[in-house]
Image (tube, rainbow, N blue to C red):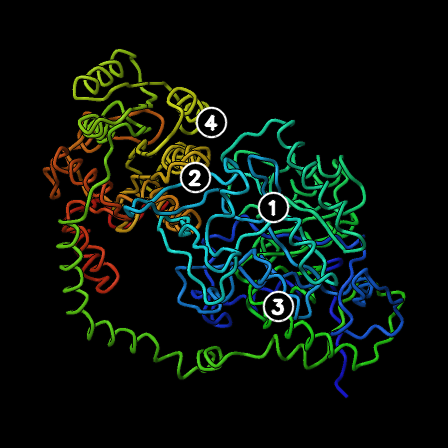
């Protein structure tokens, strides 16, 4: 018999479970994640509260000490043992990812009676599905806010689900009558692509009443109230929808185990207010995405909502739990339940880690695989005949087999931990780089040729906000956007006001329908909140955010380093602050963020230490942000060389931040004229480029720095000669 190990749970010390969770989520332990994308997954999952006791079918699990119950159909159901881990089938047997190469994601039509009954054959506790209400007040099962179809001419038609009556809704897809052909059904992904809704086992659309009548009565239901994130609902509208759903539930539920959930905070509070028979959980991604409603932006805010509204628990995106496992203890201390959802829940090691961490359950797409994992993992503990220690209630107990399955090193880790192998890695990669360099060069040429023919975004009627827009590149970008018919908002700190008025007037002359200008300090968070809100209030939308504001002081380590705080405040935080407030609005318009990061953030020229550090921070931040907001928002990072603007001339000087007068930089290093640079930048933005470097020869300098650092140092010494090679020492 295996030795039994005891680990302190997140309730007392999160360090060991955190290590286990991070290890299990390591990329080398997560196979084929690309086959289970979450393009459509961010608004669809739910959780069960620990304080309530669900039911599950007796066929799979053995509970000899539980009391048997029978429902009206004669199915034997058993109470779930307190603390037992739950598995919930997402939209039945999993959502349909029509763009995925994984056939499992296109096996059975999601949110259908066929999917629910297929899922019911496995050892599930609950089946999750989305409920909306048609125009004629009938609760139906459907996830997306819009239905897409084609007319007889092949033109794509889009219609909101809640604007249809029941007959129209049921006319899409397969029909109940054998000889009747329904309207073709299509689906739109988050990145805007359209796919015909084809699965291996299709089924007709259904109502909530049909689901109660036709789905295995031994399975519980997780009913998610689905509301559009982009619609502001009045309380009476929410109440009307909730009451219609509750009417069906009270009529047909009988002794079926049910809990409700929703991403709409006010809806969850109203569901709790309008009924007390069934648990209500709040759905949140825990900060993985950002919303204007702060209650949706963190697990702490979710806990506050649950405690204030008497909710039973939280359904959280699994990444928010793994990033902060210590939150599990706080959730449990408040006697709330915690269930997770998300694509990582389709990975067996991640689910196993959550069992040990104290999560109450998971919502999954790969129902068969994960139910088998949970059953197998649970057998380990039962076979040990563990005796509970009353003094150690907060300990997680696992067997040696469970521990080894989570903690054993992967093949890659074993090789990389070998000292001899590790010493060869650099040379192996260098050799590979040399071998593939011709192909990389050819690929760069192909991409350049393709970019010449790539379609450009139509900027007519788009709203563009530009910081640092009173002079230099910001001013010229405003003019370039104006020529293309964009509405402009220009932000600047410098006065006099007449200068900014001149820029606005010139932009109107060049073709901008309307120009709004404001004075603000981008290093102040309240100013950034103000001008983003004013932009949206004035124009009703935001399409492009151009973070251009910045200062460029010379510095020396001999200077008073405490005087360079404004460099970081303006160059870094002056871009991050407006980005934070703009993201919710850019999400709605599939907008773009353009940040002027400078090649100095990569090349690090001498006497520009603070400036280079601020720009390097920008590059790192926005490269990370790109993964969080893509593909909804495009992030474009500008790494420009020396451009002929007032930033590099002797006339540009500012007291208090370390500026010194110097010769024009165009007399020292190669520079590029500002106007062609701006035209190339805006062209690249319109084509969807994620990085833009001008002049183009600067890209070669990037390669030289990393491949031939001595040559890079020689270049810097040649163009930036220093009078003092050695630091002067006191005395």
Q: x, y percentage for residue 713?
A: 21, 56
Which numbered disc flags the more N-terminal residue, 3 or 1? 3
Q: Are marks 4 and 1 in contact (CB under 8 Å)?
A: no
Alpha-carbon span between mark 4 and mark 1: 36 Å
Which numbered disc, 3 or 1, marks the residue closer to the eye?
Answer: 1
Q: Which mark is residue 529?
A: 4
Which residue is label 1 attached to? 131
Q: Are marks 4 and 3 in contact (CB under 8 Å)?
A: no
Which numbered disc flags the more N-terminal residue, 4 or 3? 3
Label 4 Cα neighbours within 10 Å, binned few <14 / some 14-19 / many ≥20: some
Q: Are marks 3 and 2 in contact (CB under 8 Å)?
A: no
Which numbered disc flags the more N-terminal residue, 2 or 1? 1
Q: Would residue 289 appear left or right of 697 to someone viewing this image? A: right
Q: x, y percentage for residue 716?
A: 19, 51
**Hey, which residue is sitting farthest front in the picture?**
179
* Residue 705 occupies quadrant: bottom left
């Amino acid at each position: 018999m295996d030795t039994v190990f005891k680990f302190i749970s997140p309730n007392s010390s999160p360090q060991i479970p955190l290590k286990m969770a991070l290890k299990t989520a390591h990329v080398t332990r997560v196979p084929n994640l690309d086959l289970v994308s979450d393009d459509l997954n961010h608004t669809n999952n739910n959780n069960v509260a620990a304080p309530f006791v669900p039911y599950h079918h007796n066929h799979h699990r053995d509970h000899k000490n539980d009391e048997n119950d029978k429902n009206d159909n004669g199915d034997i159901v058993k109470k779930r043992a307190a603390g037992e881990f739950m598995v919930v089938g997402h939209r039945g047997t999993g959502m349909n990812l029509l763009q995925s190469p994984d056939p499992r994601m296109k096996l059975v039509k999601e949110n259908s009676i066929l999917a629910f009954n297929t899922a019911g054959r496995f050892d599930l506790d609950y089946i999750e599905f989305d409920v909306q209400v048609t125009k004629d007040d009938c609760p139906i099962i459907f996830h997306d806010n819009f239905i897409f179809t084609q007319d007889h001419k092949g033109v794509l038609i889009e219609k909101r689900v809640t604007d249809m009556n029941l007959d129209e809704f049921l006319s899409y897809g397969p029909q109940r009558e054998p000889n009747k052909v329904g309207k073709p059904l299509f689906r739109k992904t988050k990145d805007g692509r359209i796919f015909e809704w084809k699965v291996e086992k299709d089924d007709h659309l259904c109502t909530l009443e049909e689901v109660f009548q036709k789905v295995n009565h031994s399975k519980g239901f997780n009913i998610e109230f689905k509301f559009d994130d982009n619609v502001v609902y009045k309380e009476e509208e929410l109440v009307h929808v909730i009451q219609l759903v509750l009417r069906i539930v009270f009529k047909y539920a009988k002794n079926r185990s049910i809990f409700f959930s929703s991403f709409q905070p006010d809806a969850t509070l109203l569901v709790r207010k309008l009924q007390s028979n069934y648990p209500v959980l709040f759905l949140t991604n825990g900060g993985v995405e950002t919303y204007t409603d702060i209650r949706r932006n963190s697990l702490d805010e979710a806990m506050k909502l649950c405690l204030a509204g008497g909710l039973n628990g939280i359904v959280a995106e699994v990444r928010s739990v793994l990033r902060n496992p210590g939150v599990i203890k706080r959730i449990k201390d408040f006697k709330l339940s915690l269930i997770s959802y998300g694509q990582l829940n389709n990975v067996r090691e991640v689910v196993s880690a959550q069992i040990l961490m104290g999560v109450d359950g998971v919502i999954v797409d790969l129902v068969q695989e994960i139910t088998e994992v949970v059953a197998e993992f649970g057998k380990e503990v039962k076979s040990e005949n563990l005796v509970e220690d009353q003094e150690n209630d907060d300990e997680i107990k696992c067997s040696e087999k469970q521990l080894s399955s989570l903690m054993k090193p992967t093949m890659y880790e074993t090789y990389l931990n070998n000292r001899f192998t590790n010493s060869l890695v650099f040379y192996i990669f260098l050799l590979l780089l040399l071998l593939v360099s011709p192909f990389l060069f050819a690929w760069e040429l192909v991409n350049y040729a393709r970019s010449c023919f790539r379609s450009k975004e139509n900027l007519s009627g788009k709203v563009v906000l530009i910081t640092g827009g009173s002079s230099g590149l910001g001013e010229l970008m405003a003019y370039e956007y104006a020529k293309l018919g964009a509405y402009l908002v220009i932000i600047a700190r410098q006065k006099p006001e007449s200068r900014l008025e001149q820029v606005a007037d010139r932009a109107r002359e060049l073709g901008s329908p309307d120009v709004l200008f404001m004075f603000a300090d981008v290093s102040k968070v309240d100013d950034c909140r103000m001008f983003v809100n004013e932009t949206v209030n004035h124009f009703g939308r935001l399409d492009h955010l151009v973070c251009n504001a910045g200062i460029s002081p010379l510095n020396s380590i001999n200077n008073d380093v405490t005087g360079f705080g404004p460099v970081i405040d303006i160059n870094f935080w002056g871009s991050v602050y407006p980005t934070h407030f703009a993201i919710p609005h850019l999400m709605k318009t599939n907008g773009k963020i353009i940040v002027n990061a400078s090649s100095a953030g990569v090349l690090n020229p001498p006497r520009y230490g603070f400036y280079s550090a601020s720009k390097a921070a920008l590059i790192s931040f926005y490269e990370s942000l790109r993964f969080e907001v893509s593909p909804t928002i495009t992030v474009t990072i500008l790494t420009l060389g020396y451009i002929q603007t007032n930033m590099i001339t002797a006339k540009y000087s500012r007291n208090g931040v370390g500026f010194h007068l110097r010769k024009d930089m165009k007399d020292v290093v190669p520079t590029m004229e500002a106007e062609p640079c701006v035209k190339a930048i805006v062209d690249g933005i319109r084509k969807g480029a994620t990085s833009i470097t001008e002049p183009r020869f600067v890209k070669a300098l990037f390669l030289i720095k990393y491949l031939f650092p001595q040559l890079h140092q020689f270049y810097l010494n040649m163009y930036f000669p220093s009078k003092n090679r050695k630091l002067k020492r006191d005395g």
